[in-house]
Image: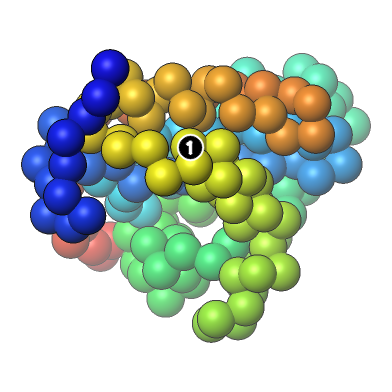
């Protein structure tokens, strides 16, 4: 089916922000797409992901998280507050590592996003179904990613006390 669109300013159903968790050692990619990317979303996603994955890593007691996003920088009080809660709740230590500005090309998940971008090959991503179809059907080193759409609304501008 042909989709008519302008080269800019088309009217999508909604806007999604890609977010991912990537385990380079295992080539496991988890793509989670929220409608609003916030510190609360990031920590909620990390909590749910670790709850499901912890059983596969029984000897791991520290997570090293490499990051590039401004929503989860250490000076963001809500992010730090929620990460402290996550550490206490999960009994897992967390080390946060940040890539310097404009150096995201060294972050392995950015290569995964590049493969996803090549996979959709300029297709018009104007519906949720089309976005999810391309996310599900891409492969990273022969493996399909785990894909989930999070429709929970997240409030922006939340600050920790």
- Residue extending farthest to the bottom is 101
Q: Residue at x 60, y 70 (%)?
A: 104
Q: Residue at x 48, y 71 (%)?
A: 74
Q: Residue at x 56, y 21 (%)?
A: 137
Mark 1 lies on a secondary structure that is: helix
Q: Give the camera-side residue of 25 and 113.
A: 113
Q: Residue at x 54, y 66 (%)?
A: 68
x then y, percent, for residue 107: 68, 62
Position above or below: 14 against 19:
above
Question: Which quadrant is the N terminus positioned in?
Answer: top left
x then y, percent, for residue 38: 31, 51
User: On the rendered structure, is 156 left or right of 56?
Assistant: left
Q: Give the camera-side residue of 20 and 41.
A: 20
x then y, percent, for residue 99: 63, 74
Position above or below: 78 against 16:
below
User: On the rendered structure, is 144 left or right of 68?
Assistant: right
x then y, percent, for residue 63: 72, 47
User: On the rendered structure, is 157 left or right of 51?
Assistant: left
Q: Identify residue for label 1.
A: 120
Question: Which quadrant is the C terminus positioned in?
Answer: bottom left
């Amino acid at each position: 089916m042909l989709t008519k669109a302008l080269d800019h300013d088309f009217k999508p159903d909604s806007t999604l922000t890609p977010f991912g968790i990537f385990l380079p050692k295992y080539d496991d990619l988890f793509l989670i797409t929220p409608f609003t990317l916030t510190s609360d979303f990031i920590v909620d996603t990390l909590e749910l992901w670790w709850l499901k994955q912890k059983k596969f890593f029984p000897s791991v007691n520290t997570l090293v998280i490499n990051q590039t996003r401004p929503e989860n920088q250490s000076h963001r009080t809500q992010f730090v507050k929620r990460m402290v809660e996550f550490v206490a709740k999960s009994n897992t230590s967390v080390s946060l590592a940040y890539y310097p500005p404009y150096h995201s090309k060294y972050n392995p998940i950015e290569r995964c996003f590049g493969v996803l971008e090549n996979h959709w090959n300029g297709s018009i991503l104007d519906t949720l179904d089309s976005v999810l179809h391309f996310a599900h059907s891409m492969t990273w080193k022969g493996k399909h990613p785990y894909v989930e759409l999070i429709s929970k609304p997240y409030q922006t501008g939340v600050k920790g006390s």
